[in-house]
Amino acid sequence: MNKMAKRIYTKAIVRIPGKNFSQGITTSDLGKPNYSLALEQHHTYCESLKKCGLELIVLEPDLDFADSTFVEDTAIVTEKCAVITRPGDKRRRGEEERIKKELSRHRKIEAIYEPGTVDGGDILRVKEHFYIGLSARTNSEGGNQFGDILKKYGYSSSMVHIDKMLHLKSGVNFLDQNNLVIWEELKHLTEFKGFDIISVISEEKYAANCLLLNSRVLIPAGFPDIKEKLEARKYQVLELDVSEFEKMDGGLTCLSLRF
């Protein structure tokens, strides 16, 4: 039986989607997002974070960057520092500088520099170890820089080459104890050998981007197989409709910076 997760998070930074949200970067073929519905879904998401015990730092829309509601990509926050990223897509560069101003009130700041690129969505923390997904957005130079920063603060890291997803956390997310949610087709990767695997069937791939917040697991609504698997392990599951963010290649982890 799964014990209640130890409470780790007390704060989260979120940014309200801007009216130009639909002009952001996407590879999906799900249609144009409805802005008013996106605002509703974002509000519900924020209320859910509060239910999980988090104090929110709510930032106003940043109309200079259509993707700026996906704040997770701009930084990685640990207990000891915050690492400001250098986004892999040039159209997003500049978002991170605006997040840096807020994070500097809470953490010592480190940063990724040219020619390195790192998106926060490619960084998966498992206790004191960080998996760095090498993707179209995160390169080896950025991964090496990030690994060196982590080492300075007593953390370890390793790199994972990915080519079937936008970000590492699109298909792999750690919950607690030894439980790892992962696409079924990736569960045999040697990097994740030894975990207690909770596999996500191909029809529910989007649901792999789930989020453990203190005593609850947030999952996107409409994915019964993964919901059943999580509840079988005694997790308290909270379903959220994030359909408008899915249209823009975003998910539950993308919408906040938790610390």
Image (cartoon, rainbow, N blue to C red):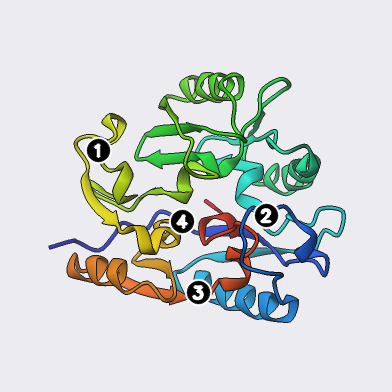
Is residue 217 among what the camera can see?
A: yes
Q: Quadrant of residue 189?
A: top left
Cα distance, mark 4 to mark 1?
Answer: 30 Å
Residue underneath mark 2: 26
In front: mark 3 or mark 2? Answer: 2
Amino acid residing under circle 3 = Ser
Marked residue nearer the N-terminal end (3 or 2)? 2
Depth order, front residue of 220/215 = 220
Marked residue nearer the N-terminal end (2 or 1)? 2
Cα distance, mark 4 to mark 3?
Answer: 13 Å
Marked residue nearer the N-terminal end (4 or 1)? 4
Residue underneath mark 3: 48
In front: mark 4 or mark 2? Answer: 2
Marked residue nearer the N-terminal end (4 or 3)? 4
Amino acid residing under circle 2 = Thr
Q: Residue 150's mark?
A: none
Cα distance, mark 3 to mark 2?
Answer: 25 Å
Marked residue nearer the N-terminal end (1 or 3)? 3
Residue underneath mark 4: 9
Crowdedness of circle 1 by 10 Å Cα count: few (<14), some, many (20+)?
Answer: few
- Residue 105 rendering spot, x and y as whole percentages: 69, 46
Amino acid residing under circle 1 = His
Q: Secondary structure at mark 3?
A: helix
Side of 39 relative to 48 (left or right): right
Q: Residue at x 59, y 25 (%)?
A: 139
